[in-house]
């Protein structure tokens, strides 16, 4: 659309292949607190939601009612091949680093998936991502996180026409919300209860 505006081109035929959101599938890599909110929003728009969890996909279905299909790592290819959008919000752990590197994203080629990364950059190395875009396994990418930050000025990602880059700003902290969480956690702490958003040191997130 921006290209058409830049060229003063009124080309309605170019948009004949657009879809309704109810026709689209989104895969959410990492269904925690953030993932549940993303799934809930996408469900509200009519999308079919897929989610990647660490284990026990069948047992967790009642835990994540916003997610239509839950998968574990061994079914990652199946998830990727069924989704029009892939949104990564996974943390950086030994199990997630390089998860999408190599030719993993070739599973997306029939859907021409758009990749959204607001989790951690090291889920895929830059060369693999560039290759996935050039090979047209991905239709495009919206990237907020990277292996090296700030993203080096000589990175090929800067100049790719189907890539949108933001400088790691997707998780802005709003003071009023931070204070609310602090107050809730202080009350829980005072009552000797578990706090919200505690880190599990064994899982590393």
Image (tube, rainbow, N blue to C red):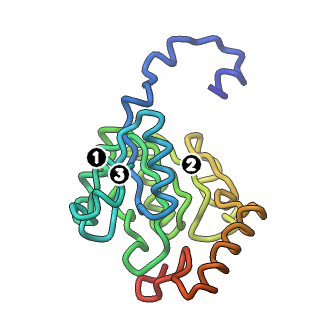
Q: Secondary structure at mark 2?
A: strand
Task: State the residue in front, 128 or 40.
Answer: 40
Residue tagged 3:
65
Q: Which one is earlier in the sequence, the residue at label 3 or at label 1?
A: 3
> Which of labels 3 and 1 is toward the front?
3
> With respect to residue 43, does 31 lie above or below?
below
Residue 11: give x, y in percent of width and height: 58, 12
Residue tagged 2:
142
> Which numbered dot is residue 81?
1
Q: Which one is earlier in the sequence, the residue at label 1 or at label 2?
A: 1
Q: Which one is earlier in the sequence, the residue at label 2 or at label 3?
A: 3
Name the image quarter holding residue 138.
Answer: top left
> With respect to residue 33, does 203 lie above or below?
below
- In the picture, measured across the screen, residue 172 lies left or right of residue 119, that is right
Query: Where the N terminus falls, by quadrant?
Result: top right
Residue 124: tell me if it is visible: no
Q: Secondary structure at mark 1?
A: helix
Q: Residue at x 46, y 47 (%)?
A: 40
Q: Residue at x 28, y 66 (%)?
A: 73
Q: Residue at x 33, y 65 (%)?
A: 53
Q: Secondary structure at mark 3?
A: loop
Residue 105: give x, y in percent of width and height: 35, 54
């Amino acid at each position: 659309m921006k290209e058409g505006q830049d060229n003063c081109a009124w080309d309605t035929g170019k948009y004949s292949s657009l879809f309704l959101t109810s026709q689209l599938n989104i895969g959410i890599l990492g269904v925690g607190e953030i993932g549940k909110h993303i799934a809930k929003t996408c469900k509200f728009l009519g999308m079919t939601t897929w989610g990647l969890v660490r284990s026990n996909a069948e047992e967790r279905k009642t835990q994540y009612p916003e997610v239509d299909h839950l998968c574990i790592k061994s079914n990652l290819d199946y998830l990727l091949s069924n989704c029009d959008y892939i949104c990564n919000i996974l943390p950086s752990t030994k199990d997630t680093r390089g998860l999408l590197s190599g030719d993993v994203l070739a599973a997306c080629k029939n859907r021409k998936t758009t990749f959204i990364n607001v989790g951690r950059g090291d889920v895929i190395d830059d060369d693999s991502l560039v290759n996935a875009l050039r090979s047209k396994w991905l239709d495009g990418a919206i990237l907020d996180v990277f292996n090296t930050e700030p993203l080096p000025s000589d990175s090929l990602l800067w100049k790719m026409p189907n890539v949108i880059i933001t400088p790691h700003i997707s998780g802005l902290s709003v003071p009023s919300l931070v204070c609310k969480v602090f107050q809730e956690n202080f009350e829980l702490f005072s009552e000797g209860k578990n706090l919200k958003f505690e880190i599990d040191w064994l899982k590393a997130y």
